[in-house]
Amino acid sequence: MIVLFLDIDGVLNKREFNPEARSSNFVPECVENLNRVLRAVPDCVIVLSSAWRYLVSGGAMTLAGFNCLLRTHGVKDTPVVGLTRNDDQLEDPKGRGRQILEWVSSNPGVKKFVAVDDLDIAVEGLPFIMTDGDSGMTVENSNKLIAILKDMS
């Protein structure tokens, strides 16, 4: 299994809060840059590492529903197969990196993986690309993600 651990805020949006939606709007350019990765690595699946995972873990929606949410915002139809565990407490950003590695270690079918986030979640053993939260995912970020997913063995 090839896995992209996906953050949403600062990756697919620019953290510009829309008060009417009570959320940040997805940015088409950022979505297209994610789609570049998903087209280049067609066997890739998504695991949510974003705080948006609480929509699923809290019961407001299913993984299939979250997949539908992504599609309605332009993301290529790609299975959302899981989410990292809930935070035990307010953690430093490195906690998210450790949660990703925990998910990988508990899913032995993972052959390749990478995380994308606007927070510095880098921990040893975690292939990771950091976006600028004010601009979201760029072409350069997507090129790096593709290189990692295609070059890992």
Image (tube, rainbow, N blue to C red):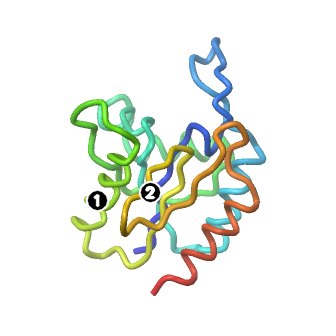
Which quadrant of the view contains residue 144? bottom right
Residue density around tag 2, few if under 14, some if 14–19, many if 20 or more, within 10 Å: some
**Residue at image location 70% in from the left, 64% down from the top:** 36
Q: Nearer the viewer, residue 150 or 126?
A: 126
**Residue at image location 61% in from the left, 18% down from the top:** 21
* Residue 12 picture location, percent across and down: 64, 43
Residue linked to disc 1: 103
* Residue 126 picture location, percent across and down: 41, 65
**Residue at image location 31% in from the left, 54% down from the top:** 98
* Residue 50 picture location, percent across and down: 45, 42
Q: Which amino acid type is shown beneath numbered disc 1?
A: Trp
Q: Nearer the viewer, residue 76 or 118?
A: 118
Q: Is residue 67 left or right of residue 102?
A: right
Residue linked to disc 2: 122
Q: What kind of element bears circle 1?
A: helix
Q: Earlier in the sequence, mark 2 or mark 1?
A: 1
**Residue at image location 43% in from the left, 76% down from the top:** 112
Q: CA distance from mark 2 to mark 1?
A: 15 Å
Which quadrant of the view contains residue 129? bottom right
Q: Nearer the viewer, residue 150 or 56?
A: 150
Q: Is residue 119 left or right of residue 137?
A: left
